[in-house]
Amino acid sequence: MKKKIKILLASPRGFCAGVKRAIEIVELAIEKYGPPIYVRHEIVHNKRVVADLIKKGAIFVEELHEIPEGSRVIFSAHGVAKKIKSQAKKFQHITIDATCPLVSKVHKQTENYFKKDHKIILIGHKGHPEVIGIQGQIQEDLVIIQSEKEAESLELDNDIKIAYVTQTTLSLDDTKNIINILKRKFPSIVGPDLDDICYATQNRQAAARDLADKSDLVLVIGAENSSNTKRLVEIVRKSNTKAYRIGSFEEINEKWLKNITRIGITAGASSPEILISEVIKFLHDLFEEVDVKTMDGVTENIKFKPLLTFS
């Protein structure tokens, strides 16, 4: 495939502060205490990140009973239910919580609304680890709403107090529409501002829209089970631009690139920059002339300190 193409790199893209913090916590724990360090669930949703940490001495499990008693255990960035922390104590595990601070904020909101006797609606995707963690903060079932259609069909007694919280990695536009429906149906409903959808999610979605407007095709790098990556693909496609999610350069189908002159590249918040570099190298090898340009975008200066305190 010999021709000239232009590569446009979204800005910002890839790792966010919460992901960086979670990975650093695992690395620091291995460095300080030595392997093995156990991690419940993927620390973040990216196979490359998980594979690199396994090489360094991390062991990933899905359930705590898989871990020997008295071991050091780290909870993933997605957050966990309170019962998981209680189970860890029964197993005499020494734990550290790598939950993203922005997810922890949603946990606290959920608890506070519950203490004030609100029926809580959680806008999010059923079965996602973050949603399961939010559900597990209180001793009452939350009402999970995944779409505008579900919001429209929701029936609750208007005499009760109602509140909503949101998963942090949703589509900003879709969530805004759902909230507007809920406010119309339940005028007294209370909930946080849309700012509670993670700043990094918002920034990457805005960058993806900009990228879609300037590209013939957009490659979104991220894991299949990454919620924020899926949202980026959806946003690009809503702009009537072709978009493909790939886990690595090996998943690129050369047929996609036929008659394409401008390729946009972005990455979900759990994707390391090395994956982007490998995609660019693949395209360099494929095309005769490649021009790479990073687009203007928001500069992210937020950092979350990786606290290494086991309890």
Image (cartoon, rainbow, N blue to C red):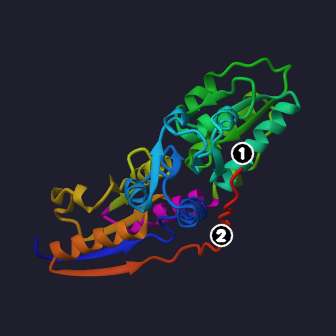
Q: Amino acid at mark 1?
A: Val
The residue beneath circle 2 is 303
Q: Amino acid at mark 2?
A: Lys
Instruction: Residue at 65%, 69% (x, y): give it.
Output: 303
The residue beneath circle 1 is 106
Screen quadrant of the N terminus: bottom left
Task: Return the residue nearer the eye: 232 or 149.
Answer: 232
Q: Looking at the magenta stretch, what is its main secondary structure?
A: helix
Q: Is residue 181 visible?
A: no
Percent coordinates x, y for residue 256 in the rendering:
21, 57
Q: Residues within 10 Å of mark 1 (few under 14, many from 20)?
A: many
Q: Earlier in the sequence, mark 1 or mark 2?
A: 1
Does residue 88 appear left or right of residue 189 in this picture?
left
The residues bearing labels 1 and 2 have C-alpha atoms spaced at a distance of 19 Å
Labelled disc at residue 122: none
Percent coordinates x, y for residue 209 in the rendering:
47, 61
Range of the magenta residues? Answer: 199-217
